[in-house]
Image (cartoon, rainbow, N blue to C red):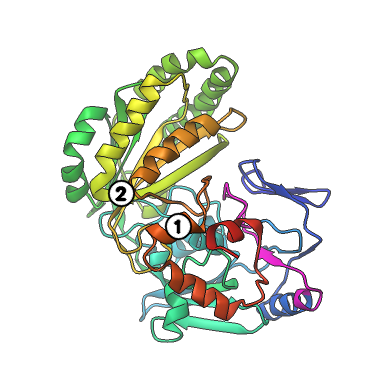
């Protein structure tokens, strides 16, 4: 249970601990019919409705003081279609369970983010992504969706059926209906070779275009207060399988990346002046390593150190300039940042409100340890990101509103028009959607 959001005395809290809400009513439907009935009943009582996943969003995107729908019983694989190369899965299924179940069937998603705690509906609805030259977002791998709309009816969509809904609902922000099932494109399970190695910040910046072009999945972490990064390249491999040995994996992924990192963050929170020295040690603690394994064991890693996060997508061509400005800002400020900055990429896609909609994108994510003041850092970073027409991740901290977002998303009005049609009475409203989509 530790990884998910918690509910105590009727209060729902998110994973990051920065959002809490007291819904008037909660329900855990065991079927799509039960869920639809709950939506209709809420409508009769004039009550807003929100579905939550595991609370991995840092925004209040799932908050409601009305009816809170928990998807805990809507889990599991509904159907595997090997001929079509698809799998249909219930909306409340955690990505971890989907990945393990697919591996058992000899199948895999093409790409995924680095955390597997989220439900499939929560992850896709907020635009969760990994890194990739040819694929990145989880939602771009969707081939079909089933959702319960505001009037309690069940609507299915795909490229052929209700294509206008399909274009938007793959990353629907919970504004168009409650997703009940998702059909993903899958492929026979394959092997990835991961190559992790430290690299100077200036070299990564100078060679970024080449590193991106030559690798199927390239990402790196820059350690603020240092000139160091840790890079990771994941490429498909003919094998053989060479996983990280268990003890070594525990030492590097649990002890160093979670245990020691947690302790370093406690020290940094108590004594901010120690952060630059700790950052230099952290950036040197991770040595180069290469391993080969099935996709989810390479793409994902445990994240036990709690944090809050802001992430923006900028045009890929603007990445190096944006990152250099971020580094210059941190270097000349009194800020003490103990979390690395994560940089990933995504190809342009055709989803209405995807952060990569219509443009090749690079993502820059800034994090702060939970409980440390993050406002000054995030505000300064956001100023840099928005100067480059950045698009904020829907599930991470940002201060943008509909007026700004309608300028950086060419298809913004297409989404709001669809929302007017599917939810004219704003059954799925909350404060967050009012801010980012308008009333």
Where is residue 370? Give x, y as percent: 59, 33
* Helix, strand or loop for disc 1: helix
Q: Residue at point 35% right, 43% down?
A: 387
Residue 88 in view in this figure: yes
Give the Cα separation between the discs numbered 2 and 1: 44 Å
Figure disc tally: 2
| Residue 254 visible, this angle | no
Which residue has dot 2 on it? 241
Q: In this rendered view, identify the residue nearer to me: 91 or 158.
A: 158
Residue 44 lies within the magenta run: yes
Direction from residue 41 to residue 167 in the image, left or right: left
**Furthest-right residue in this view:** 9
Q: Residue 8 location, x and y as percent?
A: 79, 47
- In primary-sequence order, the first of circles 2 and 1 is 2
Q: Which residue is outermost to the bottom?
A: 161
The image shows residue 354, relative to residue 422, as above or below, that is above
Residue 323, numbered label = none
The percent coordinates of residue 63 (x first, y second) are 67, 56
Crowd band around label 2 with a 10 angstrom C-alpha radius: few (<14), some (14–19), many (20+):
some
Q: Secondary structure at mark 2?
A: loop
Category of crowding for the residue at label 1, using alpha-carbon neighbours closer than 10 angstroms: few (below 14), some (14–19), many (at least 20): some
Q: Main secondary structure of the magenta part?
A: loop
Front one among 315 and 36: 315
Q: Residue at x 57, y 72 (%)?
A: 176
Name the residue: 45% across, 70% down: 413
Question: Is 132 colored magenta in this rendering?
Answer: no
- What span is colored magenta in the figure? 42-62
Residue 331 occupies quadrant: top left
The mark closer to the camera, 2 or 1, is: 1
Q: Position of residue 234 (x, y in %)?
A: 28, 47
Mark 1 lies on residue: 405
């Amino acid at each position: 249970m530790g990884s998910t959001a918690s509910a105590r005395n009727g209060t729902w809290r998110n994973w990051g601990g920065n959002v809490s809400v007291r819904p008037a009513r909660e329900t855990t439907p065991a079927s799509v019919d039960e869920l639809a009935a709950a939506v209709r009943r809420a409508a009769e009582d004039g009550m807003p409705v929100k579905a939550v996943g595991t609370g991995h969003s840092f925004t209040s995107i799932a908050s409601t003081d009305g009816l809170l729908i928990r998807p805990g019983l809507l889990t599991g694989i509904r159907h595997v279609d090997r001929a079509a190369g698809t799998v249909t899965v219930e909306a409340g299924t955690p990505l971890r369970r989907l990945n393990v179940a697919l591996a058992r069937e000899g199948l895999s998603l093409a790409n995924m983010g680095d955390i597997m705690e989220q439900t499939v509906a929560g992850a896709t609805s907020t635009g969760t992504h990994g890194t990739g030259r040819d694929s990145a977002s989880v939602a771009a791998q969707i081939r079909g969706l089933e959702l319960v709309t505001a009037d309690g009816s069940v609507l299915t969509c795909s490229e052929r059926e209700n294509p206008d809904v399909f274009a938007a609902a793959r990353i629907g922000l919970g504004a168009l209906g409650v997703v009940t099932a998702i059909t993903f494109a899958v492929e026979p399970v394959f092997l990835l070779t991961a190559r992790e190695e430290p690299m100077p910040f200036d070299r990564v910046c100078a060679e970024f275009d080449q590193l991106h072009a030559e690798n199927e999945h390239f990402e790196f972490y820059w350690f603020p207060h240092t000139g160091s990064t840790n890079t990771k390249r994941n490429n498909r491999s003919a094998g053989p399988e060479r996983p990280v040995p268990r003890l070594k994996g525990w030492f590097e992924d649990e002890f160093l990346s979670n245990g020691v990192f947690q302790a370093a963050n406690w020290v940094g929170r108590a004594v901010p002046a120690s952060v630059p020295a700790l950052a230099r040690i952290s950036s040197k603690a991770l040595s180069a390593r290469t391993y080969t394994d099935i996709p989810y064991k390479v793409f994902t890693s445990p994240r036990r150190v709690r944090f809050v996060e802001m992430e923006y997508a900028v045009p890929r061509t603007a990445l190096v300039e944006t990152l250099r400005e971020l580094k210059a800002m941190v270097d000349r400020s009194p800020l003490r940042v103990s979390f690395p900055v994560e940089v990933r990429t995504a190809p342009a896609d055709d989803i209405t409100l995807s952060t990569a909609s219509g443009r090749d994108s690079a993502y820059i994510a800034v994090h702060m340890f939970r409980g440390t003041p993050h406002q000054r850092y995030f505000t300064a970073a956001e100023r840099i990101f928005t100067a480059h027409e950045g698009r904020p991740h829907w599930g991470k901290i940002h201060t943008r509103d509909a007026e700004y977002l309608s300028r950086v998303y060419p298809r913004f009005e297409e989404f709001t028009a669809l929302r007017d049609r599917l939810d004219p009475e704003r059954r799925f409203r909350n404060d967050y959607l009012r801010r980012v989509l308008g009333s």
